[in-house]
Image: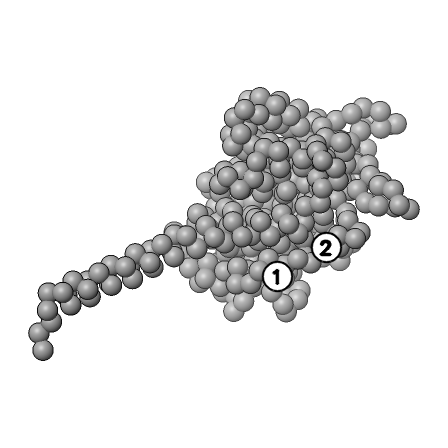
Amino acid sequence: MRLSKFTWFLTALIAIIYTATLIVIRIENPHHIQAESYQRWRETYIIKQSANRAFVNTSNNRAKPVALSEGQGYGLYVTAAAGQHGWAKSRDFDQLLNYYLAHRDYVGNHHQTPTYLMQWRQYQKNGHWASDINSATDGDLFIAMALHQAARVWPKRAGYYRNLERHLTSDILAYEYNPHTRSLTVGDWATSKSKYYRLMRTSDVAPTFFDTFYQSSHDQRWRSVKNGMLDHLADLSAQHRTGLVPDFAWVTADSAKPVKPWTVASKNDGNYSANACRVPMMLANSKDPRAQKTLTRMMKFFSQRSYVTAGYTLAGKKLNHYQSASFSAPIFLAVSRNRNHGYDNLFASQKFIFSKPLPKDNYYDATLTTIAAMEGMN
């Protein structure tokens, strides 16, 4: 039976609508995931301490909140990214920023010299807030990068943000940098008098951050930091066929080796664990050949697993048998930024982190997943 012109027209119209709907879903779905992730993360983990001050709760318990400089750095970074979409205002960013400014660290024999580094932890003790001295470099790096991004997102506040960025990056070089190893230390407490002066946290290797700080300050030391830390990371990656790197390493001017268990915080200090899991995220946007080679080696290892678990020895043995968004989110972000490397199976498998609502009781999983959504689903 021949179809009438109207039937052909109706069929064609339905086909066009169907195709258009698929296109809209394909385009809007990532946007929806980004917006939903940010809003849920903000509602769950940001606590307002006053009208002008807020912090990221890292304790997974709102009744017993704990603020970390790492969490504050992530909070500022995520909020600046949300601001690009219009989901956050400069007021939201400034509330987090004011908390950081109220908890700057002091250095010197008697902790008499103020810096723009952040004290690494705040918590409630005997009904009052306490703040632990000393800084943590990973938090300071993210705070500085967030300030740089915020200056672009909110131009009316750009002068203020850039001034703070300059002060902070200057103090990172003054108090968290070892010129002999060409690496950032793990915090301002790891001075030349400390046995930890040569300790490097692998997730502090942030080449795109270092490029940005150099472009802002024209301080050649940022080039030295980038080259030194990428060399050390590439050295560590080449020491095992897996390409995996440890949470922490001892470094000299031209060498690097994984630390032993319990050197810093846990039995997994020398494994690919809770710190090193961020390395793919930190290398994701870098075009430096050393970063790309290290990332490619790691992605090859992960792509050969039936599923990625929460941590490995450097030889590739599983530390656990379960999956964790803290490990999968950075991998998803790295693969999404480097799709031409042929790891589509990883891109597909690691998307499980978006298959259910953002967790309300795991700050680390939720935050790294939110960063992966904001940066890896464009």
Q: Residue 257 at what x, y percent from top left?
A: 67, 48
Q: Is residue 102 left or right of residue 220?
A: right
Q: Amino acid at mark 1?
A: Ser
Front: mark 1 or 2? 2
Q: Amino acid at mark 2?
A: Asn
Where residue 226 sits, quadrant-wise, is top right
Taking the spot 20% from the left edge, 66% from the top edge, the residue there is 11
**Label 2 crowd bin: few (<14), some (14–19), many (20+), radius 10 Å:** some
Spot the residue most to the bottom. 1
Spot the residue most to the right. 126
| Mark 2, residue position | 60
Q: Is residue 339 left or right of residue 307?
A: left
Q: Is residue 36 left or right of residue 163?
A: left
Which label's residue is closer to the chain start, 1 or 2?
A: 2
**Label ID, residue 283:** none
Where residue 106 sits, quadrant-wise, is top right
Which of 93 and 262 lies nearest the eye of the viewer? 93
Secondary structure beneath label 1: loop
Which of 268 and 10 lies nearest the eye of the viewer? 10
| Mark 1, residue position | 324
Taking the spot 22% from the left edge, 60% from the top edge, the residue there is 13
